[in-house]
Image (cartoon, rainbow, N blue to C red):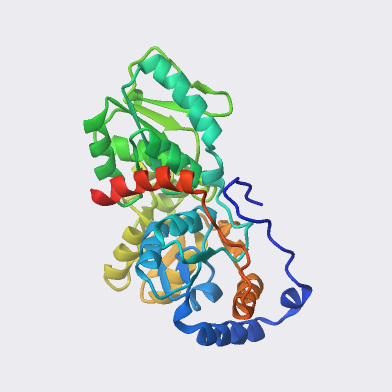
Amino acid sequence: MYINNVLSQVQSILPPSYKEAEDVDLLYQAKKRKQQLADRLFMPGHHYQKDTIIKLADKTGDSLQLAKISAENKQAEYIVFCGVHFMAETADMLTDSSQKVILPDLRAGCSMADMATRKEADTAWEYLTDKFGHTIIPLTYVNSSAEVKAFVGKHGGATVTSSNAKKMLRWALKQKQRVLFLPDQHLGRNTAYDLGIALEDMAVWDPTMACLEGDTSRDFTMLLWKGHCSVHQNFTLSHVNYYRKTDPERQIIVHPECSWEVTQAADLAGSTSFIIDQIGKAPKGTKWAIGTEMNLVKRLMKQFPEQSIISLNSDMCPCLTMNRIDLPHLVWVLDELYKGNIMNEIKVDKNIADEATLAIERMLHL
């Protein structure tokens, strides 16, 4: 279970009746509650959610996009966020104080976000500023906790998405000589390399050892946090080479959370929205191997049957933490909302939210 001191409560045990119910009955109940709650309820669903959840979502998209849409929906009293913890945190920070953000299952965390804590970030900052002086600005991927976003906001930095990472990195390098990029080293490395920064000008900060890896005498530009996505880490160069050899007409498109070696070997690399757009506008009969989360790949297979679509890694499983959001938990929180009980509310402490929002707003203003 995701542990963070901004959690407002411990999740109650799911009543057995929900676990034992058939999917068809749960779907009926979910639709019924949605009709009853009407405009008081808004349910965003992240692209990586399973189909049963996406079919019930009011809007599908990336995490920040969904948080912004939630904030724009002033009618909704309840935002039942079908995603993971950091997404619900962002939605809570951007929505009106009168709105309640709910995560159906508090165990829906993110392994990448968990790889950077505020305490670790503070330790890194003390070490790095002692070594490099006040020449560093932090950037954090939106796939990070509110506390890490607050750390970045406090030190003059901003959040980034996989779509705007290049723009934000250009901005950051105009502010300071060096960038501390959290928590995904791969997105940081891929983005910096695309902007012409050499690999030898990048160092990796290991938070578990509280040190820089490799030759620390160099004058680095990028200080990459040693974190990664557990899903995209499982796409390797051997997968790319296999299709290059066995099916050379198949185009390979990957997410920039994949390693540098994989993104360099692929035909295309880009955000989830980029991948969806590329598949959608491709000519009929185009062959693709996609390196991203399996629920999305399977959905694209159904959505574009005229294309030949497979996963770059045939053994890939859906994101385990994303799949914590299921029909039993979703119907349970909807039933409780109808009764007037708010379960699994995500509420970020105001002091944390104020600094974290600074980091988000710096990005949005650009």
Q: Position of residue 70 (x, y in %)?
A: 40, 67
The answer to whether 272 appears left or right of 122 in the picture is left
Compared with residue 254, is residue 16 higher up or lower down, i.e. above or below? below
At 38% from the left and 48% from the top, the residue drawn is 357
Q: Nearer the viewer, residue 243 or 360?
A: 360
Q: Nearer the viewer, residue 240 or 70?
A: 70
Q: Let me know if residue 292 appears in the view.
A: no
Q: Position of residue 198 (x, y in %)?
A: 29, 28
Q: Let me know if residue 12 appears in the view.
A: yes
Q: Position of residue 346 (x, y in %)?
A: 55, 58
Q: Quadrant of residue 97?
A: bottom left
The answer to whether 260 appears left or right of 106 in the picture is left
Q: Position of residue 320 (x, y in %)?
A: 60, 57
Q: Nearer the viewer, residue 291 or 22?
A: 22
Q: Quadrant of residue 65?
A: bottom left
Q: Residue furthest top?
A: 217
Number of disc labels: 0
At 54% from the left and 87% from the top, the residue drawn is 36
At 57% from the left and 56% from the top, the residue drawn is 315
